[in-house]
Each structure stands twice: as C-alpha cells, then as structure tokens.
Amino acid sequence: MEKDLFKPIKKYFEGQGFECDGEVDGIDLYMEKDGQAVAVELKVTLDFRVVMQAALRQKLVPYVYIGTFAVKNTRSPLFRDKLYLLKRLGIGLILVTKSSKAISVMCEPAEADIRDTSTIVRKRKHLKREFSERRTRLNTGGVNKQKLITSYREDALLVLNALAELGGEGSPADVRTQCGVERAYNILYKNHYGWFKRVGTGRYNVTDKGYAALEEFEDVLYTMLKNKPDGRTGK
C-alpha cells in the first residue's frame, strides 16, 4: 500500500533537513527546506497514472518525485524506458525495498518550467499557507478516507478544547482569549464539524459530538498544546 512507502521516504528527507507532512492539498508527501518546496507522489507500481499525477504536481511544486516499491530488475528494458521518460519530464524517482525499506534515488527531479497563471499562483500560495499554518505533522500520505489534520481542524480543536475548559459554554471572545485562535468566532459560527451549538446570543456550548472529538483527537491536541506558546512544531 502507498502508506507503507510514506514513512521511509519521509524519514529520508527529514534526514536531509526537510520539514515534511502528508496530504497537503492532496499531495501525498510535501516538504520544505530553506524555502525550497518538494513533492512526492506515492504509488505501489510505476504506471501511467502516477506519472500523470506527478506531472500535474509540477504546476504547484518545482521539484517532484515519484515514490514506488523497488522492481526486481532495474536493468530491464521496460524499467529503463520508464526511467528515460521520467528524466525527460524532469520527474525524480525513489525506490523503496519492501523488506528493508531501504531507499534508492534512481534520478533527481529537474525544476519544472511552468508558465504561471493566476490560478496556478493562487493554488501555490494556498499550498504553502496550508503547510506553514499547520501546527502538527501527523498526517500519513497515501491513505484514503482518513481524517486529515488540516490547519483548520487544528484551530477548531483548539477552540473546542478552550470551550470545554470554560465549562462547556462560553462566548467567542472568551474562547479566543483562552486559546489564541483569531478565527474562533468564525469556527464557532460555521460549526463545520458539528462540535458546537449556539444556545443564546453570543453563547455556544460543546455538543456530544464535540466531546467525542476531544477523545478522538487527544494526541493531536497534546502535540499542539505541548508546543505553546505559539503551538507550532518546527518553528
């Protein structure tokens, strides 16, 4: 599975000083170091679909790899043809052995030469903002149907925790003071996850779903709160 590729590749790049996280705006593994952004698309086999995905990622990230499991024969004509194609496209390739999880970089990516459009620039800014605003790096890339720890969910959890610490009911102003999340009112008002209930003018309380979320995401909250005052990892 793709998730089995995530940890060894993430560890490899962290060893080079990159700050990494999974599933950032749909990218399996996104990382930055000294302002340089790198993406890795994970796939069990090296097929056309993952090559297409990697090529599309080049619109947003200048350096893109494909991470896949090692093949039995890297000298076979078919594999050499695939490697030639990736080099022509400027896409890097990382192989991971299934048994030892050893990493082999078969080719490095070249910086993508993509014509900027307003849409691409906007998406790049959103990608970098989402990555920089995340307080944790707890996502695993290549896993479907998981609840992602986005920057919004992190802020919502801090708001939820603050409201619970206020006795389960309070005003947006009190919550914002308690947790330091500037968009506390917006999170309470929109109630995206169903964690809150408006019980009066400027008053909200925690729902049963909210209390369940406090237990479900206990590890995420612990990671954020232990990194106070700014609550951000890697800063």
Image (cartoon, grey):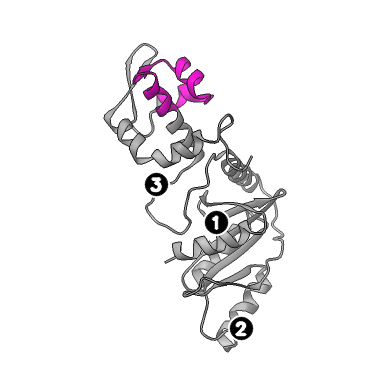
Residue 40 location in percent, x, y?
A: 57, 61
Q: What's the residue at 56%, 31% (across, down)?
A: 228
Could you say which disc has been placed on residue 2 in the image? none
Per the model, the C-alpha gap separating discs 1 and 2 is 25 Å
Crowdedness of circle 3 by 10 Å Cα count: few (<14), some, many (20+)? few
Mark 3–mark 1 CB contact (< 8 Å): no
Could you say which disc has been placed on residue 80 in the image? 2
Q: Report the amino acid beneath label 2.
A: Arg
Q: Quadrant of residue 197?
A: top left
Could you say which disc has been placed on residue 147 in the image? 3
N-terminal of the pair, mark 2 or mark 3, is 2
Looking at the picture, does residue 185 appear above or below residue 17?
above
Mark 1–mark 2 CB contact (< 8 Å): no
Prevailing secondary structure of the magenta residues = helix
N-terminal of the pair, mark 3 or mark 1, is 1
Crowdedness of circle 2 by 10 Å Cα count: few (<14), some, many (20+)? few
Could you say which disc has been placed on residue 29 in the image? 1
Q: What's the residue at 61%, 43% (across, down)?
A: 234
Q: Report the amino acid beneath label 3.
A: Lys
Residue 230 location in percent, x, y?
A: 59, 31
Which stretch did the figure color magenta?
159-188
